[in-house]
């Protein structure tokens, strides 16, 4: 047993052992660990390393990422003739329903009455119109004030005389030139 | 490749790919992202899958390249991947032996980290994943003799370090 172990170990260190021999050596090292703790430690290290793994959630994550691609790669769009025929019918029904709805709305609006007697309605209407005329008169007063601007224009007329003075001055300046 | 084949042949590789990526990026979350990206890439290339002779080796190559890209693209924080104390409750060995083994494990971890990249990945595929020389050569896309040489060097380094420490009785 011991000699076999030593032989295998030698082949292992030389890098000449086969996988089967290495497996055998592992088994032997487990049994006779007293003499070679470092070797048992080495194999223990290899075993521990091999225990590192990814959980099942990893599979789910990967599959979730690749499955949508699979779907988009083969898109199925149901657009046959029957669909178009029925879509025309559906559009006609929608149009009719919409027209009916609006017609009904219009009817309701026209038929509705606010007051029960015509006298009452006349009275309220008169009040409303009076109010409107009152506000319009108020607006007119404000506009009349603007007419004062015309008076201001009249006041500015004497200033026009200044222009005539300017012309006379021009004649004077010409005289000046002639004199020179 | 359809979804069923993907589930049967690619998804079960997740743990091998995950461990292989950790070897490079030394971060579990990052390794998980790398594996996920690679799985999606495999799915995107499913139409070319008939050209691939060895799906496992191809996936391992993808993960290796992506992990190295990650390392290059940004400074990856070196985190403690392993639990500092290993769970030894099930062991029937004496506390002294358990403590000693814990010490040995720590040394082995450090030795593995110090190995050159090529030797480390060969040793990982051989001693942790149990690959044959041929499978390792396919995965790393190198000559089979180079695999043997690297494995020999890696083991020799481990042996020397372990025995040297033992001889000094540290």
Image: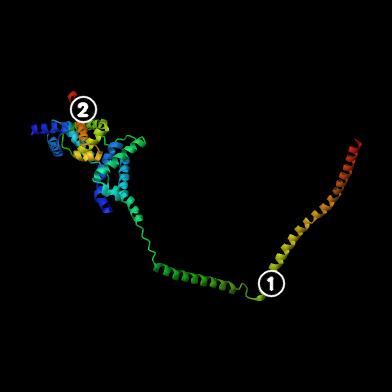
Q: Quadrant of residue B157?
A: top left
Residues B111 and A127: in front is B111
Residue at 43% from the left image edge and 68% from the top image edge = A87
Q: Is residue A6 above or below residue B44?
A: above
Q: Is residue B100 above or below residue A57?
A: above
Q: Quadrant of residue B74?
A: top left
Q: Can residue B133 be seen?
A: yes
Residue A110 appears at what percent x and percent y? Answer: 59, 73
Q: From mark 2 to mark 1, how far is it between C-alphas?
A: 117 Å
Residue B97 appears at what percent x and percent y? Answer: 17, 32
Q: What residue is disc 1 on?
A: A123
Question: Which dot marks residue B161?
Answer: 2
Quadrant in which the C terminus of chain A is drawn: top right
Question: Disc 1 on helix, strand or loop?
Answer: helix
Q: Residue furthest top?
A: B168
| Chain hosting mark 2 | B
Q: Looking at the picture, do discs 2 and 1 lie on one chain?
A: no
Nearer the observer: mark 2 or 1; the answer is 2
Total marks shown come to 2
Left or right: residue A79 compared with residue A98: left
Residues B154 and A47: in front is B154
Residue at 85% from the left image edge and 51% from the top image edge = A157
Left or right: residue B53 compared with residue A10: right
Residues A57 and B39: in front is B39
């Amino acid at each position: 047993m011991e000699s076999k172990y030593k032989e295998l170990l030698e082949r292992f260190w030389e890098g000449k052992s086969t996988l089967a021999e290495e497996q055998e050596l592992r088994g032997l090292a487990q049994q006779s660990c007293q003499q070679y703790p470092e070797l048992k430690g080495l194999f223990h290290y290899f075993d521990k390393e091999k225990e590192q793994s990814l959980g099942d959630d990893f599979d789910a994550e990967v599959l979730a990422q690749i499955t949508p691609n699979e779907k988009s790669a083969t898109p199925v769009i149901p657009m046959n003739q029957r669909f178009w025929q029925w879509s025309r019918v559906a559009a006609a029904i929608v149009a009719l329903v919409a027209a009916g709805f609006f017609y009904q709305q219009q009817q309701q609006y026209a038929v509705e009455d606010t007051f029960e007697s015509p006298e009452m309605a006349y009275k309220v209407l008169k009040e409303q119109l009076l109010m409107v005329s009152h506000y319009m008169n108020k607006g007119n007063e404000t506009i009349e004030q603007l007419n004062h601007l015309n008076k201001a224009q009249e006041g500015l007329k004497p200033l026009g005389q200044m222009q005539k003075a300017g012309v006379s001055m021009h004649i004077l300046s010409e005289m000046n030139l002639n004199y020179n | 490749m359809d979804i069923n084949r993907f589930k049967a042949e690619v998804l079960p590789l997740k743990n091998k790919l995950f461990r292989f990526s950790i070897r490079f990026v030394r971060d579990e979350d990052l390794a998980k992202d790398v594996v996920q990206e690679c799985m999606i890439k495999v799915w995107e290339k499913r139409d070319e899958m008939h050209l691939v002779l060895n799906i496992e080796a191809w996936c391992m190559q993808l993960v290796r390249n992506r992990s190295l890209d990650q390392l290059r693209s940004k400074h990856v924080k070196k985190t403690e991947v392993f639990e500092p104390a290993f769970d030894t409750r099930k062991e029937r060995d004496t506390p002294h032996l358990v403590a000693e083994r814990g010490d040995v494990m720590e040394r082995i971890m450090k030795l593995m980290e110090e190995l050159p990249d090529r030797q480390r990945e060969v040793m990982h595929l051989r001693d942790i994943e149990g690959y044959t020389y041929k499978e390792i050569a396919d995965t790393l896309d190198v000559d089979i003799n180079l695999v043997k040489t690297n494995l020999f060097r890696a083991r020799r380094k481990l042996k020397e370090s372990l025995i040297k420490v033992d001889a000094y009785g540290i």
